[in-house]
Amino acid sequence: MAEIFDSVPEKIKDFEIDERILKLAEKAELACSDTFAEIDRVARKNGERVLRAFINNKVSSACLAGTTGYGYDDIGRDTLDKVYAEVFGAEDALVRHSFVSGTHALTVALFGVLRTGDKLVSLTGKPYDTLEEVIGIRGKGNGSLADFGIDYDQVELMADGKPDIAEIFNKVKGAKVAYIQRSRGYSLRHTLTVDDIAEVVKSVKNANPKAIVMVDNCYGEFVETREPLHIGADLIIGSLIKNPGAGIAETGGYIAGRKDLVELCSYRMTCVGMGKEVGCTLNQNKSMYQGLFFAPEVTANAVKSAAFTAKIMTMAGFECYPKEDEKRGDIITTVLMKNPENLIAFCQGIQKGSPIDSYVTPEPWDMPGYDSQVIMAAGAFNMGASIELSADAPLREPYAAYVQGGLTFPTARMGILTALQEMHERHCLKLF
Ligand SMILES: *Cc1c(COP(=O)(O)O)cnc(C)c1O
C-alpha cells in the first residue's frame, strides 16, 4: 500500500488536497477492502448475466442502428426489450428513450394497470416526492390517479425503517396494486434489500394473491445479484439516467415484468392496440445497449464510492447512513452535515471535483415542489444523471446531503476529497 502511494504523489498533488485528508482517504479505502471485494463479486455475477442475455438474444450490429418515423420492425428496440427481460427476470420489457424520466415510466405503469374503482396501496410509506401529484396526494383536477377515481392508501414503515409486515397483510386485502419503493430516495428511511422485498411480496401474495406487486426499482439495479422480479414481484420500473444506463444511455426509462401487464403499460405509453409495435428509436439504441452492458461495473463503482463516502465522512466526524460495511440496497449515502455551512461547502466541493462544469458554484435555490431551499451539485455528462457523482440536499434539519453515483471509483473518490478540501478551507473540518 505505502509503496503504491509513494509512487504517485506528484499527480495527486495537482489537486492540492491537504496531506491529512490524503492520509484519511488511504485509511478509509483500506477499511473498505472487504466491502469492495464483495462489490466486485456482485459485479462479476451481474456482468455475466448481462453478457449471457446479449448472447442468448443474438444482439447484432443491426440492432445498434435506429429507425425513424413509426419505427415499425425496429429489431434493435424489440431485441433490447428481450435482453432487459432476461437480465431482470421478466416475461417482457419496455425500454424506451421516450420515457422522459423515471417518474414518467412509473406514471405510465400506474395508469397502465389501474382502473376507476381500484385501489393503490404503498407499502413503504410516502412514495418518492414527484409521485405525490401523480397519485393525487397533492393537487386536484389535473388528471391524477385520484381524479380518475383511483383510491390510495399507505402503510408506514416501522420505527426501525423496515416494512410493517402485519399491517401490510391487513391493508393489501382490497388492493389492485401493492407498491414498493426499493431505494430510500431522498429521505432518511431505510433502503430495502431484495430479501426485505421478498418478505413483503410473500405477505402480499398470502393476503391477496391477485394483487399486482409493482416496484419502483430506481437506484437499486445491479446493487445485488437478484432483482425484485426474481423473488416474485410482478412489475419493476426504473430510469436509464441511473444505474441501468451506466451514464451512457442519454435519457429514458424501462418497465419490465409480467407480459400482460407490460402490454397494458405499452397501450398507455403509445395507443391501445399499437402498444410496443411502434415508436422509433432514432439514434438511441447503441447507447442504451452499451449502457446496459456497462451497468453492472458502473453500478459497482458507484456502490464503492458510496461505501468510501460513508467511511471517510464517518472518520471526519459526520454520521452516515448506511454505514460503510452495512448491506446496501442502492447507491446512496446520506451524510448528516450538522449545519448549512458544512452542507454548502461539501456540495460546492463535490462540484469542483466534477468532470463537467467544475468551475461553476451551485447555490441553494427555491426549487418548485420543495418547502425549503435545495442545493444540488452535479457535473455530469448527461444532465441530471445521478449515476454520475452528485449530491443533493434540502437546507433544513438535519442538513442531510444525499450523495450518489460515480462512473469510476478513482474519479468519484477524488470528487469526495475535493469536497473535504473545500470544507477544510472553510474551517468546517477538524483535521488531526
Ligand atoms: C430517481 C427516482 C425516481 C424517479 O425520478 P426521476 O427524476 O423522475 O427519474 C423515483 N423513485 C426513486 C426512489 C428515485 O430514486
Image (cartoon, rainbow, N blue to C red):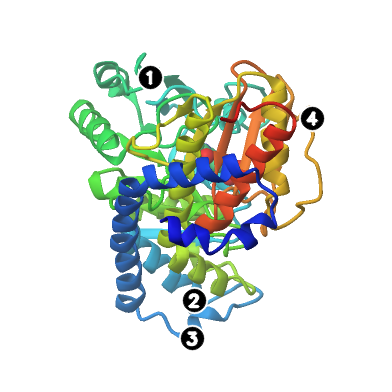
Residue hosting label 1: 157
Who comes first in sequence, dot 1 or dot 2? 2
Who comes first in sequence, dot 1 or dot 3? 3
Q: Position of residue 273 (x, y in %)?
A: 49, 60
Mark 1 or 4: the one toward you: 4
Q: Position of residue 28 (x, y in %)?
A: 45, 42
Quick one: quadrant of the N terminus? bottom left
| Quarter occupied by residue 50 | bottom left
Q: CA distance from mark 3 to mark 2?
A: 9 Å
Query: Residue at (72%, 24%) from the top-left corner?
Result: 341
For badge 2, the amino acid type reads Gly
Q: CA distance from mark 1 to mark 4?
A: 30 Å
Callout 2 crowding tier (Cα within 10 Å): few <14, some 14–19, many ≥20: many
Query: Residue at (25%, 50%) from the top-left corner?
Result: 230
Quadrant location, ligand no. 1: top right
**Residue 89 appears in the figure:** no
Asked whether 401 or 79 is in front, the reply is 401
Q: Position of residue 324 (x, y in %)?
A: 39, 37
Q: Are marks 1 and 4 in contact (CB under 8 Å)?
A: no
Query: Residue at (40%, 17%) from the top-left corner?
Result: 156
Who comes first in sequence, dot 4 or dot 3? 3
For badge 1, the amino acid type reads Leu
Asked whether mark 4 and ligand 1 are closer than 8 Å, the reply comes as no
Query: Residue at (38%, 53%) from the top-left corner?
Result: 222
For badge 4, the amino acid type reads Trp
Q: Are marks 4 and 3 in contact (CB under 8 Å)?
A: no
Q: CA distance from mark 1 to mark 2?
A: 41 Å
Residue hosting label 3: 61
Residue hosting label 4: 365
Residue 76 drawn above or below residue 314: below
**Residue 386 appears in the figure:** yes
